[in-house]
Amino acid sequence: MTSDTIAAISTPPGIGGIGIVRISGETAFGILERLFRPADVRLRERMTTDGFLALPSHQVLYGTIVDCRTQGAIDEALVLPMAAPRSYTREDVVEIQCHGGSAVLRRILESALHAGARLAEPGEFTKRAFLNGRIDLTQAEAVIDLIEAQSEQAAAAALNLLQGRLSRELTSLRLLVQDLSAELEACIDFPDDMPMPSVGRRTEWADRLASGISLVQKLRRAADVYPQIRDGLTVTLLGKPNVGKSSLFNALIGHERAIVTELPGTTRDLIQAETRIHGVRLQLWDTAGIQETDDRVEHIGIRKTIEQCGRSDMILFMLDVRDAIPGTDDPVVRAIAEKPHIVVLNKLDQVEAFDPTPWQKRFDPA
């Protein structure tokens, strides 16, 4: 039910400079009247006669929050009343911005509950925004994505959804299908009343249908990419021992995380670190070099490397240009065959002259 008034702490647990308690529902302003003592004497006098009707909407008010049972002061706070429908839930909403200590927030919430509010369920403010027509389902999902975004690209993508970009495109697609369906059905169901569509009319229908198909394909591509933007990409460095994977790994994350030596087989286990490139969150994995080996520990590392490749969104396949160009039967080549990958040629400074042509023909025949 949405007729009752709910309250909850809206800021994360822990100690901070500012904390927020949010109240939403029909009696939100009445509850605030029992909790809030404005510092402005004139507003306090108006509230004495007019009650919560004296509270101006969408104006920040300063005063004291009190315990509704004892009238004892809890904290000095800023209060923002927002009258329906100009609020997140399209209900009367009050935000109490107080000091961020957990004891203060807990006491203010308890006072609001004693004044008549009910403790909100997880996500209930957004649920009410949806039920009251403030946002649709795609925007509701975007709220949590924006809150949890850990990169600039993820935040930008979630904000696009929250601002209704996907909703507008889906609405446009639905209207297109409805219009075409109505026209075609009218021609079929009422052949005596509807003239046979002209060649120009049929061409127009075909063009509109093609534009709809194009939009569906665009939305499908966006749906495939969005989880990677939201969650980040898992990128694994792969190659034979001592080709420079760990050096590249350290360079990408900006500090020395993996041990680098001139000895092959230095990395025997998976090493993970997080970085951001052009606003995209990357989970980078350095791996054991793949080669034939009788060393039991190294063999375990190679097996884990192959398993990690299967969990990756992209492979950075590193090669030493001093080595022979690998063939299709090479175990590393087989490991990346079904994955998006970038070929990285390393150690060009170790050869007198380098001709990229045979490498391009092998890995980029187009």
Image (cartoon, helix red, strand yellow):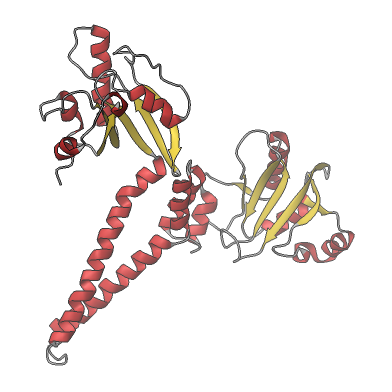
Quarter of the image for residue 276 reads top left
Residue 64 higher or lower than 331, as above or below: below
Residue 84 higher or lower than 12, as above or below: below
**Residue 326 position within the rendered picture, expressed as x and y whole percent measured from the top left:** 15, 27
> Would residue 188 appear left or right of 41 to someone viewing this image?
left
Taking depth in this image into account, of 74 and 243 the one nearest to the observer is 243
* Residue 292 in sight from this viewpoint: yes
> Would residue 34 appear left or right of 304 to someone viewing this image?
right
Taking depth in this image into account, of 74 and 227 the one nearest to the observer is 227
**Residue 8 position within the rendered picture, expressed as x and y whole percent measured from the top left:** 62, 45
> Would residue 77 appear left or right of 281 to someone viewing this image?
right
Quarter of the image for residue 201 reads bottom left
Count of all numbered marks drawn on residues in the image: 0
Residue 32 higher or lower than 18, as above or below: below
Q: Residue furthest front?
A: 352
Quarter of the image for residue 264 reads top left
**Residue 143 position within the rendered picture, expressed as x and y whole percent measured from the top left:** 49, 51
Residue shown at 20%/17% (left/top)? 291
Residue shown at 34%/70% (left/top)? 172
Residue shown at 28%/73% (left/top)? 176
**Residue 314 position within the rendered picture, expressed as x and y whole percent measured from the top left:** 29, 36
Taking depth in this image into account, of 18 and 213 the one nearest to the observer is 213
* Residue 185 in sight from this viewpoint: no
